[in-house]
Amino acid sequence: MHFHKLISDLKEQSDNKIVLLVSDGIGGLPMKTGGLTELETAHTPHLDALAKAGVQGLSTPIKPGITPGSGPGHLGLFGYDPLEFVIGRGALEAAGIGFEMQDGDVAIRGNFCTVDQNGNITDRRAGRIPSDESAKVVVKLRAVKIDGVEIFVEPVKEHRFVVVFRGVNLGDAVSDTDPQRTGVPPLEPVAQNDASKKTAKIAADFFNQAKQILANEPKANCLTMRGFAHKPHMPSYKELYGLKAACIAVYPMYKGLASFAGMELVGKPATLEEEIDVLESSWKDYDFFFVHFKYTDSRGEDGNFDEKVKMIEELDKIVPRIVALNPAALVVTGDHSTPAKMASHSFHPVPTLIFSDLARPDGCEQYGEKYAVTGGLGHFEAQYIMSLALAHAGRLGKFGA
Amino acid sequence: MHFHKLISDLKEQSDNKIVLLVSDGIGGLPMKTGGLTELETAHTPHLDALAKAGVQGLSTPIKPGITPGSGPGHLGLFGYDPLEFVIGRGALEAAGIGFEMQDGDVAIRGNFCTVDQNGNITDRRAGRIPSDESAKVVVKLRAVKIDGVEIFVEPVKEHRFVVVFRGVNLGDAVSDTDPQRTGVPPLEPVAQNDASKKTAKIAADFFNQAKQILANEPKANCLTMRGFAHKPHMPSYKELYGLKAACIAVYPMYKGLASFAGMELVGKPATLEEEIDVLESSWKDYDFFFVHFKYTDSRGEDGNFDEKVKMIEELDKIVPRIVALNPAALVVTGDHSTPAKMASHSFHPVPTLIFSDLARPDGCEQYGEKYAVTGGLGHFEAQYIMSLALAHAGRLGKFGA
């Protein structure tokens, strides 16, 4: 039996609320042998109190040794096996800029490139053209018109943009046109199945019109297209868990990922304090709240240990406001580790705690990596965080008699 | 998505080197309640230093409760799910004597047996005929000639030998001829599919000619054939991990298993010290080194606790020579446990440590079973040792954006 079928069968209606507080990239490493991690270094009296009363463990985002990007990392946290539910590059890019895809849309990641007079690529990233310059060129591409299909072209960053085709019978099995090397022209978009032939034809048409429009650009005089993708088909939080779910996040990427799971995007917070304002004001309206805190990851990516420590301490300060709302289960975790030492996402498992009246005490006195190693939740895959949260919130029935 | 596809997609080129030091059967048990295991008893200052600076855990070779033979045990260590990649008995036997199979070869395990004047088996193992006697009889079987097929017959041990057919269109789906009981004649080899009909016919022909040759032997006057098998089809270390891999081992079985994974067999070491000599002299030529130490298993199989302790201490002595080479990741593990108390392989999980600059400290002060229980790697399946090793060596990219 698929685990989703089991969970969906066992879900129970309840007023018990769940908060999933995701501190992006919270897990870390000591800078030097014998040192402490960022989380172990931070002064976190409120998180430690949750750890003492609750239960913690180490969650592996994907599988041992695998470093996740934000997409697979969050899919795991949301309860979707990230190796089963793979979000196409185009859809992830669209999510990242907050573009709301509809069923049947095909999203594509576009890259500006530079070609010579023979049409051969000389720079696959058009000299990493600055975002403000690039955005102006992207707008020009909106002049492309193709019968029977609505086309959206949206800037992302530097040489990257998103193209979305909206129409009927548009398959998404189309090959990338980026040859992955210079000295050759972009490839033709080729349909990988019959259902995608129309999409491939539209893509070829788009490319030809776009090339005319770009002909006189100094750097971005051509384009490649990658990762043709539908909106991922995932069972919603309502179907799977019986949860009316809210997403409270600042950045578009996380809103996009949450919307794939059928969460409603609530409020327009710009800071962590504002996120908690939204949580408080919408408390009565939802069963589940995904609250995303970005800056632990950002400072980790910067390689700034001390600032990441500060961000964790900022997070700690808002914990009492969440606890005051009296959730049946409060989960604190991250989508992956981002050690300042590595200045990047990493494969290390993530300290994860559940604060709930049903948590079995595990003797952990604080929240942190070295405590989580021996915590009561053990070492487990992140895709089970949701079933653990539902269980601790008393929202799952018994399997079998 | 299959895990191998994921790993292969994420592999990155790098000069960072990995050493997989396998101490065969290293895990153990105390001889008496309240005692220590062999590894806990051994004085291992160098391994303990690795444990202190690195991270350890317990790896389960196959699944909880399953005792592996050397074949599945090593396949797991090498990163192949041992329940998915099953090596046929004949191919394993060929690997065990260092016979280099080619693609398309069919290897078969032969057993001498004794039959009465009616051709019915009276002893399925020909009185466990001594190896030196048996080898002479095996050589006689090389007189068998069959048109269009090259035949190799090689002694193994006691009543056992290996037959290999080399030719075109030889399927390996042929039934065993060992009836698994006495009082009846050997069975006919029967093809299980059309592609194996030729092989079955050759096997029947081989049996008839061999029976003539053996007719006057006092004990080994007949034979049975089992485990018809091609060389297993496994993605190579190069394909899977992007690793140029070396096998440094004394015994043929481990060389054979490593060669199935596409590792190159380097040097002809006869002792552990010579293995490390080979490691040092070939350090520049490979990305990955599988170094196999046999005697922890051998002394465990002998039921000799004290000698197994000594072997672990021998292993400890060479650790500084490996560390001096500065591998990006050094993994120390075993393919299974071999407790002297049981004088056999066992199902107990294996203490496994990774020494690397990216290891997250776990507070373990020594290398050993009771430390590994609460180690930072947790309890995991051996098939993830390779992804963990690659990750700790900085040789895997990020999954998704």
Image (spheres, coloured by chain):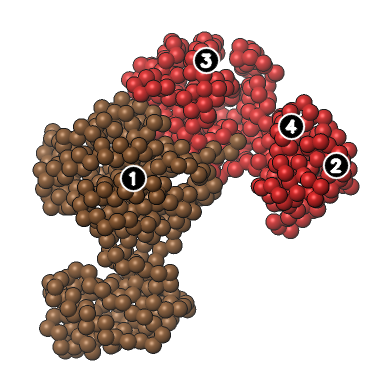
Chain colours: A red, B brown
Q: Amino acid at mark 4?
A: Ile
- Nearest to N terminus: mark 2 or mark 3: 2
Please determine if labels 1 and 2 lie on a single subunit. Answer: no
Tell me the number on the disc at residue A215.
2
- At label 1, which amino acid type do we have? Leu
Using the rendered image of the protein, determine whether residue B57 is visible from the camera's viewpoint: no
How far is disc 1 from disc 2 in space, using C-alphas?
Answer: 55 Å
The residue lying at 40 percent from left, 79 percent from top is: B199
Q: Residue placed at 33% from the left, 79% from the top?
A: B151
Q: Are marks 3 and 1 on the same chain?
A: no
Residue B87 percent across, percent down from the top left: 36, 62
- Marks 4 and 3 share the same chain: yes
Which residue in the protein does label 1 denote? B20
Parent chain of label 2: A
Tell me how far mark 1 sits from mark 4, CA to CA.
Answer: 45 Å
Residue A304 circle label? none
- Residue A154: name its quadrant: top right
- Look at mark 4 in the image and give the residue it sits on: A129
**Quarter of the image with the C terminus of chain A in it:** top left
Query: Disc 2 to disc 3, how far (Cα)?
Result: 46 Å
For discs 1 and 4, the disc positioned in front in the rendered view:
4
Type of the residue with mark 2: Ala
| Distance between the alpha carbons at the discs numbered 4 and 2 | 16 Å
Whole-percent x and y of residue A343? 52, 26
Mark 1 residue element = strand
Residue A144 drawn above or below residue B237: above
- Label of residue A307 in the image: 3
Inspect the image, locate mark 3, and give the three-letter code of the amino acid beneath it.
Answer: Glu
Q: Is residue B356 left or right of residue A396?
A: left
Which of the two labelled residues, at mark 4 and mark 3, occupies the earlier sequence position?
Answer: 4
